[in-house]
Amino acid sequence: MSKAKLEQAIHSTLNKGEKAFVPYIMAGDGGLEKLEDQILFLQEAGATAIELGIPFSDPVADGPTIQEAGKRALSADTSLSGVLKCLFTFKERLDVPIILMTYINPIFIFGVEEFAKECRNSGVSGVIVPDVPVEEMDILADALKKSEIALIQLATLTSTLERIKKIASLSEGFLYAVTVKGITGTRNGFGNEVGDYLERIKKVSPVPVLAGFGISSPEQVKAMAGYCDGVIVGSKIIELIQNKDEKAIQNLVTAVK
Ligand SMILES: O=P(O)(O)OC[C@@H](O)[C@@H](O)c1c[nH]c2ccccc12
């Protein structure tokens, strides 16, 4: 089933002695007619799962690259319901689990129950909703549970160990460990504390831990994955898709193999 598909994909990757690689793309960047090809390319390249962003007018956690991708997607009239309908049309070809990343507003407009049902219908395995704190997750949790969609939680560098334990115990599929203080986007380097932070989270998390934010080179992918179970790369993937640099995308994925 949906959530199990994500769990299995990560576990079978780890069992092979590899780490998970999850690319993020913005749905509708270049028009929704490109989505199937974009996803199938990343599936072929060896992605463990794909995080698919829903464009939103006020993307508070996003840096310039993803904001621009969101603007392009919105100007191509991309909506949450359009994305779900589009995924439905090729769900049989999807071996790779899909994780939707959306802010809460589009979900409220769609309706929480309806959203959970349609996610399942379209073959979505999990969701990330970054503007809902863990204390407020009840507004989504029941509906998603019924549809067997994983609700993935985010830990940050400023979370206390107590809080990380709580977040980790509630996270489904994996725990998303944010590796920078701030918004998405490529960085030149990371704080010294990041290795310790990831190892600390790994120790207390009952689910696999994936690191994301600011990771953009095969070297950074390898270094981060050394501390945890895998990585998520967004802004750099979007940039490489824009440049049609398939080889560089492949090199990022292969860095964890
Ligand atoms: O773009 P980066 O720095 O590689 O970060 C990953 C990120 O893009 C993706 O996971 C993401 C995009 N928007 C988000 C909002 C919140 C949490 C995560 C995300």
Image (spheres, helix red, strand yellow):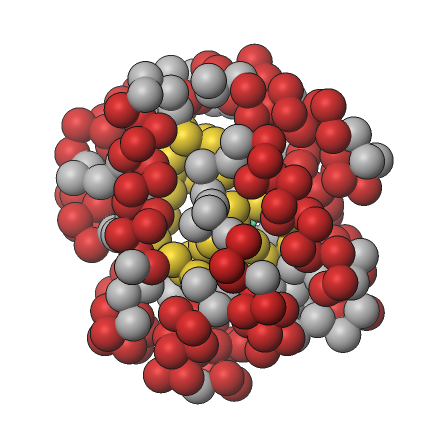
The residue positioned farthest toward the front in the image shown: 92
Q: Which percent across, then down, holds residue 76? A: 80, 69
Q: Which percent across, then down, holds residue 82? A: 64, 75
Left or right of residue 168, residue 187 in this image: right
Res. 7 image quadrant: top left
| Quarter of the picture holding the N terminus | bottom left
Position of 240 relative to 251 (above/below) = below
Residue 41 appears anywhere in the view: yes
Left or right of residue 66, residue 204 in this image: left
Tell which of 83 and 87 is nearer to you. 87
Q: Which percent across, then down, holds residue 16? A: 32, 21
Tell which of 90 and 142 is nearer to you. 90
Left or right of residue 79, residue 113 in this image: left
Position of 159 relative to 115 (above/below) = above
Residue at horizontal 80 percent and vertical 57 percent from the top: 30
Residue at horizontal 16 percent and vertical 39 percent from the top: 206
Position of 179 relative to 148 (above/below) = above
Residue at horizontal 70 percent and vertical 50 percent from the top: 37
Res. 29 image quadrant: bottom right
Tell which of 227 and 243 is nearer to you. 243
Residue 63 appears anywhere in the view: no
Res. 134 image quadrant: bottom left
